[in-house]
Amino acid sequence: MKTFYLFLLLLVCFIGYAQPNCDEANAYLVNAYSHVKDAYDSNNISHLKYYADRSLKSFKLSKNTLGDCGCDKALTLANKSIDLLAKVDGVTTYEDGRFFVKQARELSKESIIEIDKCSVAEYTEPIETQAEVSILSDLEKEQLKLKQQQEALKQKEEEIKAKLAEQQEQELSLKKKQLIQSYKNAIALNVKTYNSTLDICNCKHEVLTVNSSTETLETESLEAIKNHFNHAIKTLASNYMAQLELCETR
């Protein structure tokens, strides 16, 4: 009977000892995650290395208690994070350092979730810890930020499309005006030449003219504008030839 009570006392002591070790490891892992997150959010390599080093130290401290806590998955994740963060000090560019920090940040989230599982494994229902809530809150904030960035990019894309469409419309309008003016100049020159020729031939002719109304042409397509003026040129040439034939028969 005494042996049974002695065994029970040792068991209680062991459980009482193991639980604080898990709590202590949890605290170190939360600190490690906080520092690695600050490193990821840093905007220069100096700050990135500073916070990465602080996170590395917290991970190393967590190893001292993770073994006693018996949370093998959290220990494995902590070791992987340590290996990644140990590489940050030797990098020469901000991008390279952030590459390792990003991976360590994701692993640190997983390590906190694993240590929380170990801490509450004796209960039949899982308990959502403050660390898990904090991580989920960070993830939700990052997702919201990403969604806002995507919406801003989409709005910017629509603005660019609208500006391009407006620019193309302006360019098309300018082309139409230039085409109309070129045709009008050519026709005016032809009218002048035809009438001068008929005058030289002493033909009693009607003065050749062309309807120069182009008010609605700018709303037409380029092809329609060309067809309009080509028809006008052919009609002018036909009238000119008809006047020459009348001149010859007189």
Image (spheres, rainbow, N blue to C red):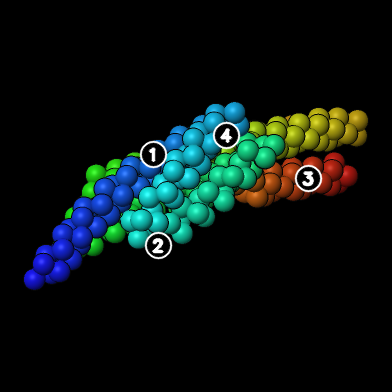
Distance from the alpha carbon under mark 3 to that under mark 4: 84 Å
Residue 49, percent from left and from top: 57, 34
**In the drawing, does residue 130 fall left or right of residue 31?**
left
Q: Amino acid at mark 4?
A: Lys
Q: Residues within 10 Å of mark 2 (few under 14, many from 20)?
A: some
Quadrant assignment, res 172: top right
Q: Is residue 149 above or below residue 72?
A: above
Q: Nearer the viewer, mark 1 or mark 3?
A: 1
Distance from the alpha carbon under mark 3 to that under mark 2: 98 Å
Q: Secondary structure at mark 4?
A: helix
**In the drawing, does residue 194 fall left or right of residue 60?**
right
Q: Earlier in the sequence, mark 1 or mark 3?
A: 1
Residue linked to disc 3: 237
Q: Secondary structure at mark 3?
A: helix
Residue linked to disc 4: 49
Distance from the alpha carbon under mark 1 to that under mark 2: 19 Å
The answer to whether mark 2 and mark 4 are in CB contact below 8 A is no
The answer to whether mark 4 and mark 1 are in CB contact below 8 A is no
Q: Is residue 5 above or below residue 210?
A: below
Q: Amino acid at mark 2?
A: Asp
Nearer to us in this view, 45 or 57: 57
Q: Earlier in the sequence, mark 4 or mark 1?
A: 1
Q: Earlier in the sequence, mark 2 or mark 4?
A: 4
